[in-house]
Image (cartoon, rainbow, N blue to C red):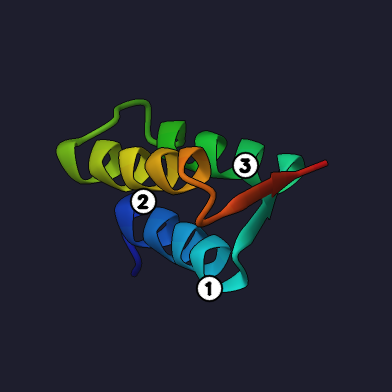
Amino acid sequence: MASESDKLREMINKAIEDGLVTNKEYNQILAQAAADGREDFEERALLANLQEMIANGTVKRTA
């Protein structure tokens, strides 16, 4: 059984591999991070990494 962090990692890795994340996908990523009612260190690190990649243009955020 995949943990919530594993599911989140898969979603974020897909966005990184694609080089883009839609607003819908981004919202799904945020929902997945909050799915278990708590955000652990690993989830925060994954989200921070994605945010940094969006900020520096490595991953594009589209509508």
Q: Is residue 63 above or below residue 37?
A: below
Q: Nearer the viewer, mark 2 or mark 1?
A: 1
Please tell me the numbered disc located at residue 26. Answer: 3
Q: Which residue is mark 1?
A: 17
Quadrant location, the C terminus: top right
**Circle 3: residue type:** Tyr
Q: Secondary structure at mark 2?
A: helix
- Which quadrant of the figure has residue 38? top left
Q: Residue furthest left?
A: 41
Q: Nearer the viewer, residue 49 or 32?
A: 49
Q: Nearer the viewer, residue 24 or 57?
A: 57
Q: CA distance from mark 2 to mark 1?
A: 20 Å
Q: Residues within 10 Å of mark 2 (few under 14, many from 20)?
A: some
Marks 1 and 3 close (CB-CB < 8 Å): no
Q: Decide which of tag 1 and tag 3 comes sooner along the chain.
A: 1
Q: Residues within 10 Å of mark 3 (few under 14, many from 20)?
A: some
Q: Residues within 10 Å of mark 1 (few under 14, many from 20)?
A: few
Q: Nearer the viewer, mark 1 or mark 3?
A: 1
Q: CA distance from mark 2 to mark 3?
A: 16 Å
Q: Nearer the viewer, residue 49 or 39?
A: 49
Residue at 45% across, 66% down: 13
